[in-house]
Image (tube, coloured by chain):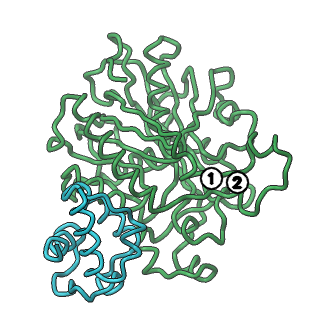
Amino acid sequence: MTAGPPPGRAAVIVGVGSYVPPDLVTNGDLVTRLDTSDEWIRSRTGIATRHMVAPGTATSDLAVEAGRRALKSADDSQVDAVVLATTTPDHPCPATAPAVAARLGLGGVAAFDVSAVCTGFLYGLATASGLIAAGVAERVLLIAADAFTTIIDPGDRTTAVIFADGAGAVVLRAGEADEPGAVGPIVLGSDGDNAELITVPGGGSRHRSARQEPKPGDEYFQMAGRATYRHAVERMTEASRQAVGTAGWELSQLDRFAAHQANARILQAVADRLEIPAERRLSNIERVGNTGAASIPLLLAQAAERGELRPGHRVLLTAFGGGLAWGATTITWPDLGH
Amino acid sequence: MFETLKEILVSKLKVSPEQVTPEATKEDVELDSLAVVELSLVLEKELGVEISDDELLDAETIGDMARLIEERSARV
């Protein structure tokens, strides 16, 4: 998809917010129950701490708080649609977005979930941009939230050290493609032939219809780490080149690289291939781990708050995850009055 | 081929040159499983040689890896 929006119908970011649950899990906490070490976790993933939901806390609880903060940042409590990107909905049915919209006092607006795992925010941006371009909505609240630890096997040291919980959100309004905050050309892709590389095998219609006893571990998230590294590096690098090229930018003009915080090693490999200098790479993976769909908006919100992301910066966003699914886009960061 | 592999390990995978000998194991040069995947991607891009990370992980030493690359490039 590379066609631009009709005049006045680009999606423009006018607010951003994020939330992480208060409980902090350090590598030291994990080492006591997993056969691993702080050094192993840091060298393989770049992660030192991550946040985890308390018992009873669900994805919608994280989403509501991030959504509330994004609406406040936009100085506007009204939107026409709520889109929630998540891997971990509160329930298999219905979607989580309507409950989030109701709790934010937005009851009655269009509300639905987008399921694209770690690329959820980029698929959500494309969806929100489409709602605006088609005239279905003037303003959209896009939230990306995951209580990812709820699908992680606490005894699996390859995933338990990486995945974490959090939420990020943006408010988008109809505007012009050339104004700050306008979402640039969005590149999206998928590869279902490799769906089994990143999966929760059980719990869906495939297993339920078979009426067999589930295999132990099938209810948990499983990831083939080495194959994932290979696909992630190649797909994010390619999608990034396409998005930057379609926007009419050069890679050397980028001020900030905001990639899905999958794993520090993957991020380094992608940024090295794109020849993006280290000081232009935004990162919060050391503090928050891999928060799934929430990763990019959580990174943007925290970087803007810390002054690492400033108005006028040319930003490249890219993500990769289960599906397989990947994407990339560009944004000139707007002045949100931070 | 050993020198080519050494050059790749040093420049692309940040291994210190004095550690790279034909007898050195992956552990000796601190090449973990993700680094082996990265090496596989680099070999494909730089030398046009397709060797999976599984095959590279089976090689005991850097010398064994160099021989594997040599055999594979001869076949291309």
Q: Which amino acid, mark 1?
A: Ala
Q: Which chain is green?
A: A
Residue found at x 42% / y 61%? A263
Quarter of the rendering containing residue A108: top right
Q: Is the C-beta separation of discs 1 and 2 under 8 Å? A: yes
Q: Which chain is cyan?
A: B
Across and down, in percent, residue A323 comes to 53, 42
Closest to the observer, A83 or B54: B54
Q: Which residue is mark 2?
A: A57
Horizontally, residue A277 falls left or right of residue A35, namely left
Q: Which amino acid, mark 2?
A: Thr
Quarter of the rendering containing residue B69: bottom left
Horizontally, residue A87 falls left or right of residue A227, namely right
Closest to the observer, B39 or A107: B39
Q: Which residue is mark 1?
A: A147
Q: CA distance from mark 1 to mark 2?
A: 8 Å
